[in-house]
Amino acid sequence: MTTFKALGLQQSLLDAVNDLGFETPSEVQEKAIPILLEAETDLVALAQTGTGKTAAFGFPLIQKIDRESRTTQGLILSPTRELCLQITNELQLYSKYEKHINVVAIYGGASITEQARQIKRGAQIVVATPGRMKDMIGRGLVDISKIDYCILDEADEMLNMGFFEDIKDILSNTPNEKSTWLFSATMPKEVSIIAKKFMHSPKEITVGAKNSGATTVQHEYYTVGGRDRSPALKRLADTNPDIFSVVFCRTKRDTQKVAEKLIEDGYNAGALHGDLSQNQRDLVMSAFRKKQIQMLVATDVAARGIDVDDITHVINYQLPDEIETYTHRSGRTGRAGKSGISMVIITRSEQRKIKSIEKIIKQEFVAKSLPTGMEICEIQLYHLANKIKDTKINPEVDSFLPAINDVLQGLDRDELIKKIVSVEFTRFYNYYNKTKDLNSIGASNDHEGGSYDSSASGAVRYFINVGEKDGYDWMSLKDFIRDTAGLGKEDIFKVDVKDSFSFFNSESGVSDQILATFKDLKIDGRFVNVEVSKNPGGAGGRKRGGPGGPKSRGKRKEKNKDFDRPRSRKRDRGNSSAPNSGKRRSKKRKGDFF
């Protein structure tokens, strides 16, 4: 196992690594750091978002900087203000044991004179957005004519945002003999042009297949009618009662509209786009990082600064105009070695785009059907039961028990449980009992493999009483069930993992074997219970492997005729440009179950 010390980092950086809790380098760090430390060279590094690229260039840059000189020696260009601040903060943490190293962030929306003043005091490293950097160069407020290192972070995204000419102008003000390090998730034509024009025989490293998506992300799509995107989005959220997600829209207007509708219908949602003031954006991001916002609706540009490891789902409310952008979107989840799900809501006319994306990310999508109303009711019922079971008893309630017992006198245990559960369940049942099927008719036939309808194919749907809090995601739970029951690779599919329980499918031919294996199965003192689900039909995926459905959440309001969503009696107040005021329910991921 490779260590950071083996990469050649000096002791002060190793101390910072230890403080940050890093144990072993990621693949891009393991490949890039030795190359950058050993020689003065140009480098092109292709790696997905969330793989640790900042440390891959940050540690070598800090180690090579001349601390005694106050001249600007390193320039890092990044696409957005949020990412610019994120990189600056990380570099400051990396260099906490280095004396006299100053890192300054330059970005729009803040005082340009104050930023110029910070640089004048001495900034060995400048982290900047292209627009503000070009402006400061034009005003003579920054001198990059003597830099030794230039780093282009998220190069493909900067060029996709229209910064091609700005980057060329900025690089033309830098010395030819500098080292240029280019980090990118994909390698489109414009990035190649920059590499050829401003780099000299660069070394190249690739983490995973070139332009491919992260292997920890499951990709799935849902085909609906053009007017059913909103109710489809809400059904996906209701199917995952602890969701923590980013919802992508193409335009600022759609982003604001979708977020407002979600908030109006009782979800803890917020909008993030370019029309918000900087203060509003800071408030929204702060609430999202604290998980007070559980569905962050964002444009592609605004989302570039999101660096949160626990995002469970990315939902593409609309596909991006440039299909290459999908790689960046899906990279918001499945970070830091965790699994994630990227969902796409499409119409039948957009299905050809799915095949195009598959070619880019080098992974296949699972064609899925939206859950039926009764499936949602079943999931919500189990979720409520587990929530009741896991609730810590407040000792202050003891003084009220005599009066409560008087009110509930005459109710036996079973009747009391039914009444408690029915308080929430009846509202969902009454709403979803008569809702329509949102899946586009015939849509599954337009994609290879189609949609796997469990009821039509003779598959059996099961409930199992383990989930995310027991340390499982869809991949590890599938392996556990398959290995425990002694089944083949393709016998278990459509594994949907919730917080404290899960669902999975099998062919009917192995049903008796599964039920017999898990009958009275006890591991480390706990029964692992498997039962046939009461709602076996519906949301099927292709047989070769089902997605997980980890965390989800959302508060309910009274029924709203405009959306496929029941509404709660207690309404959350707020607007989509500020954190929602709904009280959050925090969840902590526990260790492995067994």
Image (spheres, grey):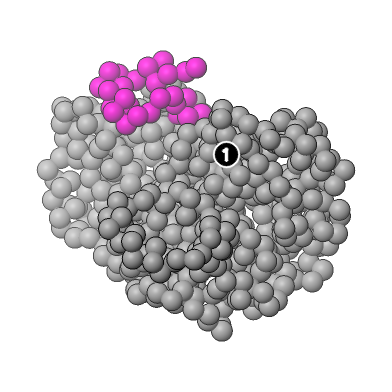
Query: Residue 539, image x and y in percent?
Result: 72, 59
Please tell me which residue lies in front, 313 or 431.
431
Residue at (28% x, 43% y) in the render: 89
Please tell me which residue lies in front, 330 or 243.
243
Residue at (47% x, 18% y) in the render: 2
Residue 210's image quarter? Answer: top right
Q: What stretch is highlighted in magenta?
A: 1-30
List the single residue furthest toward the front. Answer: 410
Q: How many residues crowd around disc 1 within 10 Å: few (fewer than 14), some, or many (20 or more)?
A: many
In this view, 9 is above or below 164? above
Query: Residue 46, image x and y in percent?
Result: 53, 38
Query: Residue 504, image x and y in percent?
Result: 70, 47
Q: Say which amino acid is labelled 1.
A: Tyr
**Would you name the residue on which mark 1 appears?**
472
Magenta span has 11? yes
Residue 210 seen: no
Residue 342 seen: yes
Q: Please state if 155 lies on the left or on the right of 465 as rendered.
A: left
Magenta span has 251? no
In this view, 112 is above or below 490? below
Q: Please state if 138 lies on the left or on the right of 589 as rendered.
A: left
Query: Residue 432, image x and y in percent?
Result: 63, 73
Q: Quadrant of the C terminus?
A: top right
